[in-house]
Amino acid sequence: MKKHTIIAIDGPSGSGKSTAAAGLAQGMGYDYINSGSIYRAIALKSIQNHVPASEAHALVEIARNTAFEISKKNGNWSLIMDSKDVSQELKNADVAQAASQISVFPEIRDTVNSLIHGMIRGNTVVEGRDMGTVVFPTADIKFFITASPEIRAMRRYEELKMTPQAMPYEQLLKEIEMRDLRDSRRAIAPLKPADDAMIVDTTTMELNAVIAFLYNETKIRLSQKYIDTVNGVRFYTTVSAGFCFGVKRAIDIAIKTSKRHNDIYTLGPLIHNPQEVKRLEEIGIKPVEDIGKIASGTLVYRSHGVTTEEAKNAGEKGLNIIDATCPFVTRSQRLVRVLAKKGFHVVIVGDVKHPEVKSLLSYALPHQVTVVKSPDELPPLWNTKKLAVLAQTTQSMENFKKIISVLLDSVYELAIYNTICDATKIRQDESATLAKMVDVMFVIGGFNSSNTNKLANICKAINPHTYHVEHEDQIKQEMLIGAKKVGITAGASTPIWLIKDVLKRLKEMSKGLR
């Protein structure tokens, strides 16, 4: 029987773990179980049956005689209790209070833990208290999500301020601090990170960035090379090959939008893969190069982002705007704006013709920012007192470091921001490792894709027998002559169906080799 992958997420109240866990499950295509909802469901049923929250034995019987399951509808996960969706009822204040009371009983916790194990049907993200320490101590991946009490109180305040449960920020902060103290000192399963958990502090992170971080870390930790053998030729592929978080998010947003609206446009290709852009166009998502060509309808911002001028023009035309910009690009946009306002001259390491870099440039005045691809392109900046450097998200770390080393010797005050996406580095590291161990390396992705071109260059420098192809028709049998090991990787904007087509063609051609 195939073992299911379990990702356990713990953390204190208000850290954002529930929303981040659900987002991670969505991105990975996993099931999602929130232990808190089960405690609330038991509390709800106890209220309905007039069972006091102090009657532990009766509560255990309620839990054991109730059918629980998880269900996904319209992209949201729901808890089904006795064939009824009770998600909305679980939000009631009296249910929350009762759940807090019943969760202190060891026999209730044991029962709920058993129920959670019984609900596992496939790869699952499980979230709540004690997930990595008690409920799933052997989970494949463990995260402990936290944040400062002040930030958690503010998040809770913003969440409740328009509801009947609203209360002053100071009161929320005091309650969170008291709860932290109580949870950390309780005798049964005190709140603490598992020894092998990655601690993620979300104090300064936005939600999308947290989900992207978890997604990329999960990809790293699950990284295994797929192996197949045909006619004596062994095939390897990097697990990271294909869509990164930001690209997958943009594709999902665009497709979801196309089901709700007509006249869907993107300013330039949504992602840098001609084959996938063509597929999207066939379902009504049309790329245009100029906003002036859009009379009305919905404009989806591409994953690389748009310039401030383009955003302004779209707003003035009254277009319906859907922002699918990668969260990591959004972070870089804000950095450029803030640094420029603080008086820094900003150096962006990247390609000035790339749409992401064009977007970043628009967040500062022309005299406040410089774009370079290599150390040789650096202009004289020695008289600049305050300099900040960041990178196009798909840049190689090696090139970024080279430019930083030159600037360190030239500038009095230098601020360095590593804005290279984790997914980019993961993909490059995995691809470099694979290129060393195979006879022939194939890099799949658009010729107009910056990150795919960098992958091809990295692999080519390691293995001269590296071929960059956009699709399977570009593969020739002579490319495989003499190869016993074949490696495959792909850019962040390469769809999985294209990777499968290339792999299928390679296998077919290997059958004709002697």
Image (spheres, rainbow, N blue to C red):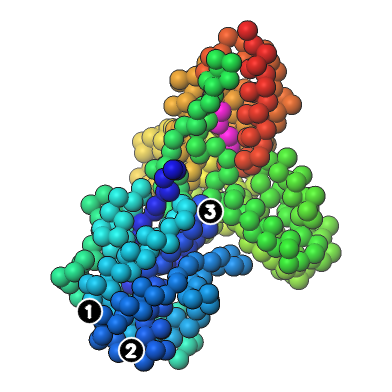
Evaluate whether residue 514 shows in this view: yes
Residue 461, percent from left and from top: 51, 20
Q: Quadrant of residue 323?
A: bottom right
Residue range of the region highlighted in magenta in the rendering: 487-491
User: Observer-nearest residue: 322 or 21?
Assistant: 21
Mark 2–mark 1 distance (CA, rounded to whole Å): 28 Å
**Magenta stretch: residue 490 in it?**
yes
- In the picture of the structure, the residue carrying the numbered disc 3 is 29
- At a point 68% along the width and 57% down the height, the residue shown is 254
Give me the C-alpha separation between circle 2 and circle 3: 38 Å
Q: Residue at x 41, y 67 (%)?
A: 34
Identify the residue at horizontal 68%, vertical 25% (top origin): 505
Instruction: Assess disc 3: are there few (<14), some (14-19) or many (≥20) residues with their C-alpha within 10 Å of its C-alpha.
Output: few
Disc number placed over residue 51 in the picture, else none: 2
Task: Tell which tag, 1 or 3, sits nearer the viewer.
Answer: 3
With respect to residue 207, does 89 lie above or below?
below
* Quadrant position of the N terminus in the picture: top left
The secondary element bearing badge 1 is classed as: helix
Residue at coordinates 23% horizontally, 76% vertically from top-left? 105
Q: Disc 2 residue type?
A: Val
Quarter of the image holding residue 117? bottom left
Determine whether, in the image, residue 346 is placed left or right of residue 74: left
Q: Nearer the viewer, residue 263 or 238?
A: 238
Which residue position is annotated with label 1? 178
Secondary structure beneath dot 2 equals loop
Q: Amino acid at mark 3?
A: Gly
Examine the rendered structure and indicate whether residue 347 appears above or below residue 431: below
